[in-house]
Amino acid sequence: MATLLLIEDDPRIRSALMRALTERGHAVSAEAAGMPGLQRVLDDPPDLVVLDLGLPDVDGIQLLRMLRPVSKVPVIVATARDDDAATVAALDAGADDYVVKPFSAEQLDARIRAVLRRTAGEDAVTVLEVGDLVVDLRARTAVLGGESLELRPREFDLLAYLAARPGEVVSKRTLLADVWQLPYGGADKTVDVHLSWLRRKLGETAVDPQMLHSVRGVGVKLVPRR
């Protein structure tokens, strides 16, 4: 399921698209004008925006030019403008796809899925770097200062999770839930043991931490090695 924002001023089209896309498993919200739509994107970013160009307060292409400096959210333009100039202008302004009315709900849904697949591939991060630590998520390898680390699977998962959030203090309860997939309230000792093993692999100790720093009563964070 994707969260979609529909920016469309025609109430009949807006209602029909909301119903059709909801029936196809999406969570759909809508705005009838451009500026409220822009504010909605900033306040509660959706997975994708379906944007009409003929809006009552601002032209859709101008809205795209306002949106792109502050958001990378994928946008499909859905409009009655079928001339090449409008298509080129919308794509140049940052649209990810362009569909001309009238179109079927099936066609729009297929375009939504295609754009989300494409943008997910573009945005996916596969290599994490924290100082001289390099974690390759696809190859499941970790290299520190040019030397490979021999990590057990759970040690790698723990390191990768923290490397994706450099400098962020993560609680042990969160680690249990997200890395071990255990409900909140599990044993913190599990995390403590793995952190101890991981510190050893990183060449440090709890007394003299270089990368893994415990924050008493809060959690642990990963920072670049001193």
Image (spheres, rainbow, N blue to C red):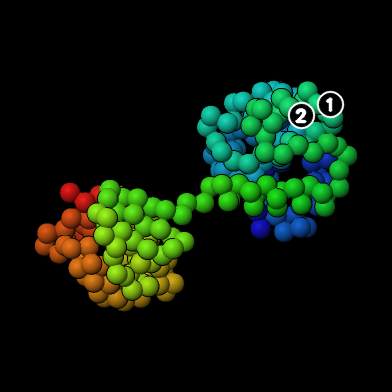
Percent from the top left, x then y, of residue 145?
Answer: 24, 54
Q: Is residue 158 left or right of residue 101?
A: left
For label 2, the crowd category at 10 Å Cα-Cα, with few meaning under 14, some 14 to 19 and many 20 or more, is: many
The residue drawn where x is 86% and y is 47% is: 104
Could you tell whether 189 is left or right of 128 in the image? left
Answer left or right for 128 relative to 91.
left
Residue 48 lies, in percent from the top left, at 65, 44
The image quadrant of residue 77 is top right
SS category of the residue bearing label 1: loop
- Give residue 108's mark: none
Side of 96 where 186 appears, left or right: left
Q: Nearer the viewer, residue 133 or 3?
A: 133
Q: Which image quadrant is residue 211 in?
A: bottom left
Q: Quadrant of the N terminus?
A: bottom right
Furthest residue toward left: 207
Q: Is residue 12 in sight in this rendering? A: no
Is residue 112 among what the camera can see? yes
Q: Quadrant of residue 150?
A: bottom left
Q: Amino acid at mark 1?
A: Asp
Marks 2/1 in contact by CB < 8 Å: the verdict is yes
Q: Which residue is mark 2?
A: 87
Q: Which percent across, then down, holds residue 135?
A: 36, 57
Q: Secondary structure at mark 2?
A: helix
Task: Say what amino acid the circle numbered 2 marks.
Answer: Thr
Q: Which numbered tag is attached to residue 83? A: 1
For the point 73% across and 27% down, the residue is 88
Q: Residue at x 58, y 50 (%)?
A: 120
